[in-house]
Image: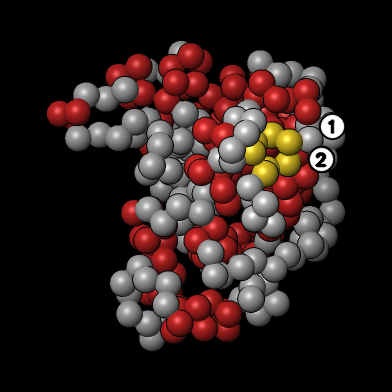
Amino acid sequence: MTAITAATWKRLKELCDDVGAEYFDMLSVLYAESGFFTTAHNPSASASGLNQLMADTAAGLGWDRDDCYPSVTSGRSPLARYRSLSYEAQLEWVHRYFANHRGKLINQAAIYTCNFLPSDLHLAADPQAVLVQKDGRRGWAYTANAGLDANGDYIIRVHELTDAIRRSCVGTRWNTLTAEFRSFLGMPPVGPVMPPMVIDLGIVAGQQRGCILLGVDPGPVDNVLGPKTRQGIRSAQALLGGLAVDGIFGPATRTAFRAALPGAVY
């Protein structure tokens, strides 16, 4: 895994300055999408990297088409080489993506909407605006993003994107990243930029967030129990100790998560 350095924060600052995004709004969206891991990958799709770039989008930005659409015989998944980039190199491509929406990234919801459904960016100012409805508007996008539907009404509204960010941006890794970025920016140290939020260990999205809080990478918070999430659970089980390292989020693992993350989970 590539390292986060002062050069990373410099590149992120340059990105935000150019596209007109608040520094911690951008960082929080990238963190909610990927845990701020360049290697993050949704195995059920091509979504990869810090902002979960899709193969078609990457190709449109000029990324190597062979990496976007590898041959079946290559044994590679889409964007495998993209995920191997350093933070600074990957942020160059994140910058290319957001530069297309320069001046419109006015808050977290706008940045997340831009990354999620860019054609709906105009809706980001209305917290109640419907982005996706399971059997209605953009229903094709619901299943893959069901983790955003926290109240289970089969509708994803703009405010639920912001809610998802707040649920994700907690824990040691988030606090460390924000402290490092604040230091780079010459800002005084403070407590967590966002207040802790409870997460539901009874659903896969909550288990993924729990893994991130423990400092391991479960892939994107997408409520999908894929190979990357199972590996993240195994890594957390090994880290916590005294558990079967089997990638199964059973009662013993849930109890261990609760003990390790008091006040953050239920």
> Residue 175, position in %: x, y?
69, 60
**Front disc: 1 or 2:** 2
- Which residue does the numbered mark 1 point to in the structure image? 125
Q: Is residue 85 visible?
A: yes
Categorize mark 2 by other alpha carbons within 10 Å: few (<14), some (14-19), many (20+): few
Please give the name of the residue rendered at 74% of the width and 18% of the height, measured from the top-left corner.
Answer: 102
Q: Which mark is drawn over residue 14?
A: none
Categorize mark 1 by other alpha carbons within 10 Å: few (<14), some (14-19), many (20+): some
Please give the name of the residue rendered at 64% of the width and 55% of the height, measured from the top-left corner.
Answer: 152
- Measure the C-alpha gap from mark 1 to mark 2: 9 Å
> Residue 264, position in %: x, y?
67, 72
Q: Name the image quarter holding residue 20.
A: top right
Work out whether residue 33 or residue 14 is closer to the camera in this orientation and state it: 33
- Which residue does the numbered mark 2 point to in the structure image? 128
Q: Is residue 96 left or right of residue 236?
A: right
Q: Is residue 9 left or right of residue 207?
A: right
Inspect the image, locate mark 2, and give the three-letter code of the amino acid beneath it. Gln
> Residue 200, position in %: x, y?
61, 68
Please give the name of the residue rendered at 53% of the width and 24% of the height, measured from the top-left corner.
Answer: 93
Q: Name the image quarter holding residue 75.
A: top left
Please give the name of the residue rendered at 73% of the width and 36% of the height, measured from the top-left corner.
Answer: 130
Q: Is residue 148 above or below residue 26?
A: below
Q: Is residue 81 visible?
A: no
Q: Is residue 165 above or below residue 83?
A: below
Q: Is residue 196 left or right of residue 228?
A: right
> Residue 26, position in %: x, y?
70, 38
Inspect the image, locate mark 1, and give the three-letter code of the amino acid beneath it. Ala
Work out whether residue 93 or residue 169 is closer to the camera in this orientation and state it: 169
